[in-house]
Image (tube, rainbow, N blue to C red):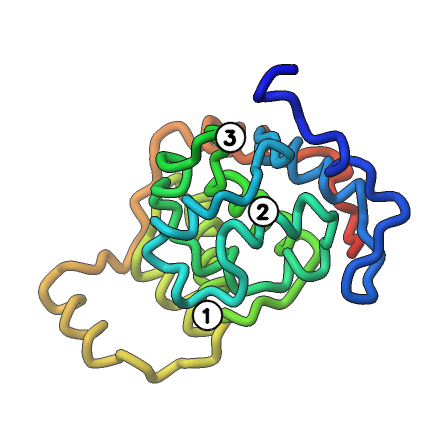
C-alpha cells in the first residue's frame, strides 16, 4: 500500500460521536474539496505546530485543527480562533512530511465559517478579513481609507486611531478616493470562480 493512501478510518464518521457531538462526514469531504487537500494524509506528527509562529495564541494547535476536520467536528473547527489567528505563512506546509497545505485548509475553514455566519472569538480579525475582501471585490485592489472606514463601522470602534489616520492623510499616505483597476470584470470573474453553487447552504 502506498504511503499516500488515505486513511479510510478518517472517512468512516457516520456513527462517530466526540465530546457529545456527532461528527459530520460531509464536513470532512467539503473541507477536502474546498481546500484541494487530502486531510486524511495528516498523521499528527506535530511538525506544523512546532514551526507555527502563532500557535501560542491558538485555542487549537494547527495539527489539532487538522484532526478536528478528520473527525468531522464542524462546530469546533469553525468556531475556534485558530483559523483566524493563522497568518498563512506556509511554514506548516513547508515542514509537513506528507505535503499537506494546512494554510489552504485554514482558508477553507474561514470561508465556511463566514458563509455559515459562525461568530469568531477573534471578531476584529474576522471583520478585517471580510472588509478586506469586500474592498478588493469593489475596486480590484485594496483602498486603505475605505477599508479603515468600513472596519470602523463594522467593529464600532469609530474613534480609535483617529490621530494616526489624520497624520497618514496629511502626509498623502491615504488616498481618500479608490483607484480601481482597469479590468474590473476580471476581478469579478475571480470572485465568481471562488463561489461554489450551493456551498454550505448555511448548515452548521
**For residue 174, above or below residue 122:** above
Identify the residue at image location x=46%, y=56%.
129
For mark 3, does the 10 Å Cα neighbourhood hold few (<14), some (14 to 19), or many (20 or more) residues? few
The picture places residue 182, in percent across and down from the top left corner, at 35, 30
- The numbered dot on residue 124 is 1
Distance from the alpha carbon under mark 3 to that under mark 1: 26 Å
Residue visible at 37% across and 37% down in the picture:
95
Relative to the observer, which residue lies in front, 61 or 44? 44
Query: In the displayed structure, would residue 43 be above or below residue 113?
Result: above
Residue extending furthest bottom?
Answer: 159
Q: Which residue is mark 3?
A: 190
In the image, what residue occupies the spot 84% across and 56% down?
17
Say which quarter of the image contains residue 42: top right
Q: Quadrant of the N terminus?
A: top right
Secondary structure under tag 1 reads helix
Q: Which is nearer the N-term, disc 2 or disc 3? A: 2
- Mark 2 or 3, closer to the camera: 2
Which callout, 3 or 1, points to the residue nearer the camera?
1
Disc 1 residue crowd, few under 14, some 14–19, many 20+, Cα 10 Å: some
The residue at 54%/61% (across/down) is 60
- Where is residue 63 drawn, in percent x and y? 52, 49
- Which residue bears the numbered disc 2? 66
Would you say 146 lies left or right of 8 here?
left
**Which of the 4 quarters of the picture holds residue 29?**
top right
> Is 46 situated above or below 79?
above
Q: Earlier in the sequence, mark 1 or mark 2?
A: 2
Q: 79 and 114: which one is in front?
A: 79
For residue 54, which numbered disc appears in the image?
Answer: none
Could you say where residue 125 lies in the image, as x and y percent from the top left?
Answer: 45, 64
Q: Secondary structure at mark 2?
A: helix
Amino acid at each position: 500500500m502506498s504511503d499516500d493512501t488515505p486513511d479510510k478510518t478518517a472517512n468512516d464518521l457516520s456513527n462517530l460521536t466526540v465530546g457529545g457531538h456527532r461528527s459530520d462526514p460531509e464536513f470532512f469531504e467539503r473541507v477536502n474539496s474546498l481546500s484541494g487537500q487530502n486531510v486524511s494524509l495528516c498523521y499528527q506528527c506535530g511538525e506544523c505546530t512546532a514551526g507555527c509562529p502563532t500557535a501560542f495564541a491558538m485555542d487549537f494547535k494547527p495539527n489539532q485543527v487538522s484532526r478536528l476536520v478528520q473527525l468531522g467536528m464542524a462546530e469546533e473547527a469553525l468556531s475556534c480562533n485558530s483559523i483566524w489567528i493563522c497568518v498563512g505563512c506556509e511554514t506548516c506546509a513547508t515542514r509537513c512530511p506528507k505535503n499537506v497545505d494546512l494554510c489552504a485548509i485554514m482558508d477553507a475553514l474561514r470561508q465556511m465559517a463566514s458563509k455559515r455566519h459562525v461568530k469568531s472569538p477573534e471578531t476584529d480579525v474576522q471583520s478585517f478579513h471580510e472588509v478586506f475582501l469586500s474592498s478588493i471585490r469593489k475596486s480590484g485592489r485594496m483602498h486603505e481609507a475605505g477599508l479603515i472606514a468600513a472596519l470602523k463601522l463594522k467593529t464600532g470602534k469609530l474613534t480609535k486611531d483617529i490621530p494616526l489616520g489624520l497624520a497618514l492623510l496629511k502626509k498623502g499616505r491615504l488616498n481618500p478616493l479608490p483607484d480601481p483597476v482597469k479590468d474590473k470584470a476580471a476581478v469579478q470573474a475571480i470572485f465568481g470562480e471562488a463561489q461554489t453553487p450551493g456551498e454550505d447552504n448555511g448548515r452548521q
